[in-house]
Amino acid sequence: MTGRIDLHLHTTASDGTISPADTVRAAAEGGVTLLAITDHDTTLGIAGAQAVAKEVGVTLVPGVELSCDLESVDLHVLGYFVRPGSEELQAGLRELIHFRDLRNGQILEKLAALGAPVRIERVKEIAGSGSVGRPHIAAALVEAGRVSTITEAFHRYLARGKPAYVPRRLLTPARACEIIHQSGGIAALAHPIKIRSNAAVENALAAGMDAVEVYHSDHTAHHVEMLLGLAKSHSLLVVGGTDSHGPYSDRPLAIGSVTIPEWVGDELLKRAPEWWREGRNEPPLR
């Protein structure tokens, strides 16, 4: 295959800053020919991306990024070729939505006690059709005049260790891999360098991973070399992407700006399931 690859992208279906359709258009304009939509804990962006991908002639891999916890260490698991209509997948996502709703309520209670109240109704309006999270609460704080910027909202209230922070209740890596596999997908450990615990990385890989994210915007050349060795020693597929959240995020990475060898895409596509190869569209979610 020719063209750039980006297998880690977020849209407004979760905490990205541009729509699934505009994400695909931006990818195509940047020369990306193989991309994956991997929104946090939701597949709602995939349908909107699929239609545009056909229009602009790029290959779209339906994906997801599941939030996990392993012995108090946060990590993420990417799922590729997941079937959005899979009941097993949607049941797992409902678990995370329930956990997230509880957390959001606790954050708002803390903000109110700190003299910086915002309404959950407004936070949901800001989130639109996407899942509600801290970026939307931060935007509501800015709108209400409690802070000047989203960055300030995190630094003053929402970041880990700040007065309105609430720890997340998440899936285990084994549960995340199970959910992805039940939907026919491939499970990959996301940005392992961010985990900062070799033991947690090894334990996560042993939980059922099929791949590891080697190429990432936070990975240096040294990290890439080390992770290529890790993938080889564990007989894992290699994946990679920018982890872009769009041009209006606090880290506006251009889609396709991480250099990923063509063989990465070729090897991933070899593992594509039959339904995807045949170009079948999943039924819309109700």
Image (cartoon, helix red, strand yellow):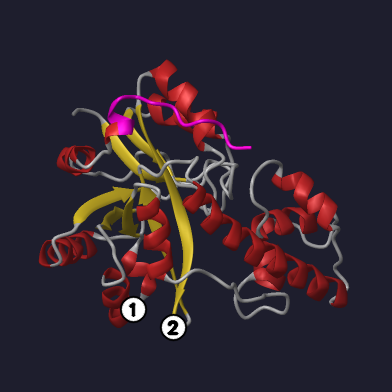
Q: Secondary structure at mark 2?
A: loop
Quadrant of the snapshot with the C terminus? top right
Residue 82 to residue 139: above or below: above
Answer whether residue 277 is magenta in the image. Answer: yes
Residue 256: x and y in percent read: 35, 39
Badge 1 crowding class, 10 Å Cα cut-off, few under 14, some 14 to 19, many 20 or more, is some
Q: Check contact, mark 2 vs mark 1: CB within 8 A.
A: yes
The disc labelled 1 sits on which kind of residue?
Answer: Ala
What stretch of residues is rendered in magenta? 275-286
User: Where 199 falls versus 11 (above or below)?
Assistant: below
280 part of magenta stretch: yes
Evaluate whether residue 265 shows in this view: yes
The secondary structure that dominates the magenta segment is loop
- Which residue occupies 40% across, 48% down? 183
Relative to 66, 155 lies left or right: right
Picture coordinates of residue 9, whole percent (x, y)? 44, 44
Q: Which residue is mark 1?
A: 200
Q: Position of residue 148 (x, y in %)?
A: 76, 57
Q: Amino acid at mark 2?
A: Glu
Q: Position of residue 193 (x, y in %)?
A: 32, 68
Check the picture and name the quadrant holding the N terminus: top left
**Circle 2 sits on which residue?**
71
Side of 214 relative to 76 (left or right): left
Nearest the camera: 2 or 62?
Answer: 62
At mark 1, the secondary structure is: helix
